[in-house]
Amino acid sequence: MKINCQQLVTSEDNRAEKAIVNALITLARSMKSPLIATNIDRDDTVNSYTAMGGSLV
């Protein structure tokens, strides 16, 4: 599964996109499926992604 994490650091108006990313992280983890997250190029993106349960390699 591949997700774009760029929406994690944009304005607060993107709650729906953040909820979708969070749900996909949870789904991939529960299915023990590999997850590829893209656009994790800023510290705040990393923090949001890992707070949702994503892991970095």
Image (cartoon, grey):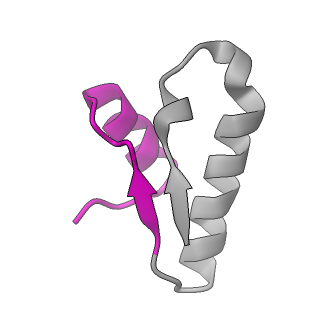
Residue at 34 percent across and 27 percent down: it is: 44
Q: Position of residue 45 (x, y in %)?
A: 38, 34
The C terminus lies in which quarter of the figure?
bottom left
Q: Is residue 28 left or right of residue 48?
A: right
Residue at 65 percent across and 15 percent down: it is: 12
Is 14 magenta? The answer is no
Quick check: 29 above or below 12? Answer: below
Highlighted magenta segment, given as a residue range: 35-57
Quick check: 14 above or below 35? Answer: above
Q: Tally the marks.
A: 0
Residue placed furthest toward the left: 57
Find residue 47 and report its image quarter: top left
Is 41 magenta? The answer is yes
Find residue 29 and report its image quarter: bottom right
The N terminus lies in which quarter of the figure?
bottom right
Q: Position of residue 34 (x, y in %)?
A: 45, 80
Residue placed furthest toward the right: 16
Quick check: 2 above or below 45? Answer: below
Residue at 44 percent across and 37 percent down: it is: 48
Q: Position of residue 30 (x, y in %)?
A: 61, 79
Q: Position of residue 50 (x, y in %)?
A: 39, 48
Residue at 43 percent across and 57 percent down: it is: 37
Q: Is residue 49 left or right of residue 24?
A: left
Q: Is residue 36 left or right of residue 11?
A: left
Find residue 25 and report its image quarter: bottom right
